Image (spheres, helix red, strand yellow):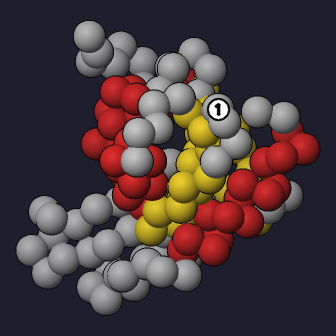
Amino acid sequence: MDTADIPGLIREAYEAQKFSYAPYSKFYVGAALLTAQGRIYRGCNIENAAYSPTNCAERTAIFKAVSEGERDFEAIAIVGSRDEYLPPCGMCRQVMQEFCDRKTFQIILAKAPEDYRAYRLEEMLPEAFGL
């Protein structure tokens, strides 16, 4: 992914964040997933009173894309409602491992469109489970 395109992907994540359903934690998360074909799938966190059925923004975006036949992903931008970089949880990292190239897939953690850190999946999930 070209670094010039990263701020736009981050803005898409902020748009996704507006749809978060987080009445319990009040922690609103948005994600924007970029495919190799240039399509963007947005995801937000969706909480549940039982907590276990809660779904993270990252998995929401990935599952939306996969359910529509996408399998080739370049990057994901993640934003939260606190002024901090928000890394994906272990479950989300494992889902990324299932569907993304660990050597090239970028995970972008952002506080603002111009304030972010980018990592490769292999950096965030060394020794991952896989086929």
75 to 45, vertically: above or below: above
36 to 26, vertically: above or below: above
Can you give x and y, in whole percent of width and height, for residue 10 in the image?
71, 59
Q: Is residue 30 left or right of residue 119?
A: left
Q: Is residue 48 left or right of residue 45?
A: left
42 to 117, vertically: above or below: below
Residue 23 found in image quarter = bottom left
Q: Residue furthest front?
A: 69
Q: Is residue 106 left or right of residue 100?
A: right
The image quadrant where one finds the C terminus is top left
Q: Residue furthest left?
A: 50
Q: Residue furthest top?
A: 131
Q: Residue furthest right?
A: 4
Residue 80 found in image quarter = bottom right
Can you give x and y, in whole percent of width and height, for residue 102 in the image?
50, 20
Identified at 13% across, 63% down, the residue is 52
Can you give x and y, in whole percent of width and height, for residue 100 in the image?
47, 27
Q: Is residue 1 visible?
A: yes
Identified at 70% across, 42% down, the residue is 38
Q: Which residue is mark 1?
A: 36
Identified at 53% across, 29% down, the residue is 72
The image quadrant where one finds the N terminus is top right
Residue 53 found in image quarter = bottom left
Q: Is residue 82 left or right of residue 130?
A: right
Can you give x and y, in whole percent of width and height, for residue 5 in the image?
83, 46
Q: Is residue 115 visible?
A: no
Identified at 59% across, 28% down, the residue is 105
Looking at the rendered structure, the kind of residue marked 1 is Ala
